[in-house]
Image (spheres, grey):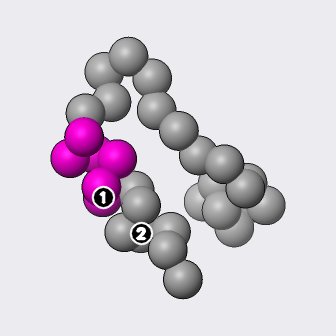
Amino acid sequence: MWIDAGARLVGGYCRTRPAQIRQLAHAVRP
């Protein structure tokens, strides 16, 4: 959703864990 809206940088907050970051990276990589 964020990438489709034009976001170029997506991050997390205090409770974002490494596994969640890996999932996010996998989802947005071309």
- In the figure, residue 26 lies in which quadrant? bottom left
Tell me residue 29's x, y (percent): 49, 74
Question: What amino acid is at disc 2?
Answer: Ala
Q: Is residue 24 magenta?
A: no
Q: Seen from this angle, which residue lies furthest right?
A: 6
**Amino acid type at mark 1:** Gln
* 10 is higher (above) or lower (below) than 14: below
Whole-angstrom CA distance, mark 2 to mark 1, is 6 Å
Name the residue beneath numbered marker 2.
27
Is 20 colored magenta in this rendering? Answer: yes
Q: How many marks?
A: 2
Residue 23: assigned label = 1
Relative to 15, does residue 10 appear above or below in the rendering?
below
Q: In the image, which residues are magenta? A: 18-23
Residue drawn at (25%, 33%) of the image: 17
Residue 12 position, x and y percent, is 46, 32
Query: What kind of element bears circle 2?
Result: helix
Could you say which quadrant of the image residue 4 lies in? Answer: bottom right
Horizontal arrangement in the rendering, residue 26 relative to residue 11 (left or right): left
* Camera-side residue of 20 and 1: 20
Q: Quadrant of the N terminus?
A: bottom right
Query: Which secondary structure lies at badge 1?
Result: helix
Q: Does 29 sit left or right of 16 as displayed? A: right
Q: Is residue 17 above or below residue 15?
A: below
Callout 1: few (<14), some (14-19), or many (20+) C-alpha neighbours within 10 Å?
Answer: few
Residue at left offset 53%, top offset 38%:
11
Q: Position of residue 7 (x, y in %)?
A: 73, 54
Q: Residues within 10 Å of mark 2 (few under 14, many from 20)?
A: few
| Side of 30 where 20 appears, left or right | left
Q: Position of residue 27 (x, y in %)?
A: 41, 69
Query: Between residues 13 and 1, which one lies in front from this camera angle?
Result: 13
| Outermost residue, bottom side | 30
